[in-house]
Image (cartoon, helix red, strand yellow):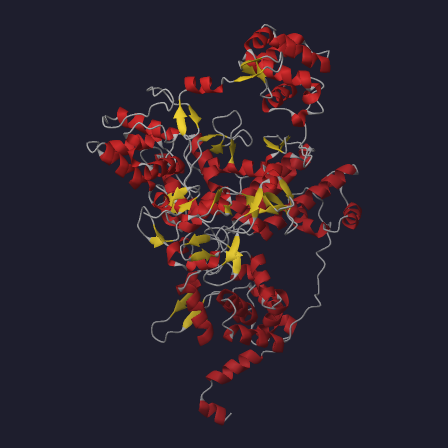
Amino acid sequence: MGSRTVSGYAAAVLDDPLSIIHAAVQRADPTLAASLLSAALAEAAPSITVKRRLAQALFENPELLTDRQPLGPPAMDRLIKALQGHGSTGIELPLCGVCHRDVDLTNRQGPLRICGSCYTRERKRIESCTSCGESTLTRYRDWEGRPLCASCERRISEVDQLNRLVNQITIINADVDTGLLREIVERELPKAGNQRRIADELAEHPLRLTTEAAHATAATTGLLRALVNAAIGGFVMPPCPFCNRAVELTTVRERLRSCRRCYEQHHAQVCAGCGAARPAASRNASGAPICRSCHNHQPENQDTCPGCGERARLYRLAGQQPRCRRCQRSPITICAFCGKLKECYFADTATPRCEPCSSKLLRREPCSVCNQIRIVRTRTADGAPVCNNCGLPKALCHSCHRKMTVRAWLPDGPRCKACYRRHPDSFKPCQQCGKLEHLHHFGLCRGCACIAQLRNTLGDDTNIIPRLQPVYDALARSSLESTLTYLEGGGSQLLGQLRETGRPVTHQMLDEYRNLPHTRPLRDALVCAGALAPRDEILHTLEEQFHRFLADIDDEEDRKLLRSYVTWRLLHKLRTKARRPLTRPQATYARRQLSIAADLLKYLRRHGRQPEEADQHDLDRWQMSNTQAHRARDFFQWATARRHFRRGLLLAPRPRYHGSDTMTDDERWKHARRLLHDTSIDRCDRFAGLLLLLFAQPSRRIVTLRTDAITQRIDNRAVSLALGTEPVVLPTLIGQLALDLVVNRYRGRAALAQTSDHDWLFPGVRAGSPMSSQNLNIRFNRVGISAQPARTAALMDLAAQMPAAVLAALLGIEVATAQGWVTEVGQNGAYAADIARRHRPSSEQANP
């Protein structure tokens, strides 16, 4: 075996401490079963550090288990007792190094371990008493370690130390209740010896509970903290004497109590691994200091995690098997800050907190590197804060040879994030399905982790809760990666609330959680999966908005009139369009119509006029005061037909806007050719743009096209597009583009959906819904096309070539609209003459 040591351990001990312990125990007691040895070792040495201490001691002296020499660490006694408890007979406890008795060895004398009695006798030495000056055996030492003889100690012990200490405190604040003060001191210092030491300290330094508190001992600082917590006047906790921060002073630096940060700065050394100035956690073979991060990344300080199967630094939580940080799970309890049932730190205290709340409580300061206010990860040698991103260890990547943030420390060198994901070592077998890929957490791939999280959220100890089975099916049938993103983004909290209700999931139940951002994608996924009936959500929301709007109207007559208008006019018109989903612009326009109608009635009431009494002068004055008055024409016509207004009154129509933006035919054909041949443009934008430029289709109709609008003949493979009553045969290139959209379907941007959940050519963000017309217009602008001028130019070109009936049949517009465009361009019948010539026999053409 080699003699090289790292942090005081031999290389063989670092490589495999268990084998050294097993070999020594088997030599001492060959009859002991390996299983019993493993059980005893787990009891006596729960951590890898204790195992190394035992292995190092047995490596240096393999006979420690049998020769009863008191040379090993205290953990050796625990191991021997555990082995004896499991039936071992050839192993014996060590004897005291002084009296050679078989007793507990609680102290040390040099390299030997001795019992408490021998330790006490060794400490009794002839010294000069601090009080009387007589040379005799020391009986007691005061708070500074000065010796006292037996007679002086007896004289001092007869004094009531509690009353002495209370009197010293009342000198600082004479108004304090002595009964309360005695209760605080007895609770904080139950033993008379502790009371005596603090009283002695305050007798020599009366200001150590006030201005000199930074010089006080730990026991005196604890008493001061108890006084401050009890709100006793005149007492405050001192700030750190080095950084002047009001934080807890848990360490001692230069004989002054200091905070942990100042203590670490004072003891910081240059790490031999990463080069950062940090406190040394261990040392390498040459004795150079190693920081905690580099110490944890050393292979000898890592072990195979039983949770994910990867090698990492293992940590132990109370009552749990050692695991790596990623696999550790905190107990589930109610967070004291957000009130939610989550995995919380400090679950055994009165203030448990979950990870998000813990992150919010971490100290945030401007980073000295990036100047962003972020959580402080570490500090430089001069105390400047460094955030988590800037403070991550950086090294020269072994693959790309750049100094980057280290993602993984591999045996041949560090790797950055990009290089590590390409390295074979980053691919691990999933513990559940065995697939070799990048694991998500707990040794599972993303798919298995998603299913496990769904079962934990929607199931019990046996299976999925029956009433939540449709929810599980809807989420599991979607892309597992997308579902996992939904769950980890906050969807699991919504599912947990649905589980606690104890009711089946319905539209009415989900309406109670409509304000949560994760409700809408869940509802859409359930509808697409068939677990819920389809419902026009925009129309449903609009109805509720109408109801709330009407409830806020004060006048009973106006509210009754507007409710009739909403029921029999607005909603009736919107429901007749149920064959197509209601769009947000339509809902917005309907809300504006109702708002303007209510403003008209309110104006008349304010001027003391009933709707039946209003005249043209009243309407004109209202139109002058409201620039959106033309939106009330629909309500006014409806109310006039039902005799709520007098006939013959008029509202001005909407002013026609003649836009200055125009598009020439050359520009239109230039855009069309670019969309037809430029494959770098998204095929969705290409086909939609061609429908706009060549067939004058508005955005609101393009986005509602379904896959059945595109057909292909069997005989000549011609592709047709149904825009109106007559299908349009598409040119070859446009037909291929249309077929590509049908065959290679867009999945859409919905997180919880499948391609088969919809038949839209242009799917939208919501599962089962098409793209919005506003989004399509934005996409047109990105490729340099303005939608309205392009459609106007295309309509004018088409209206100049064909009559209104043909135009309406091909483009799917109203005949009256088509006739208006034909009239606008002044078509003169050339289309009919051209058709007649096209069908006339050649002989007639030769002899007219």
Residue furthest to the bottom: 847
Q: Residue at x 44, y 76 (%)?
A: 732
* Furthest-left residue in this view: 31
Residue that sits furthest to the front in the current view: 135
Residue nearer the viewer, 664 or 683? 683
- Of residues 736 and 36, the one nearer the viewer is 36
- For this rendering, which residue is in front, 798 or 449? 449
Vertical order, 522 against 848 (above or below): above
Task: Measuring from the top left, give residue 128's x and y in whole percent.
Answer: 58, 16
Q: Is residue 40 among the parts visible in the rendering?
A: yes
Picture coordinates of residue 723, whole percent (x, y): 49, 65
Q: Nearer the viewer, residue 707 or 426?
A: 426
Q: Residue at x 76, y 40 (%)?
A: 604
In this rendering, the answer to whether 516 lies above or below 821 is above
Up/down of 557 relative to 162, above or below = below
Q: Please tell me in which quadrant of the rendered image residue 182 appears.
A: top right
How many labels sit on residues?
0
Q: Position of residue 473 (x, y in %)?
A: 36, 44
Whole-percent x and y of residue 254? 63, 34
Give the vertical position of 782 relative to 670 (above or below): above
Q: Is residue 295 left or right of residue 815?
A: left
Residue 237 in view (yes/no): no
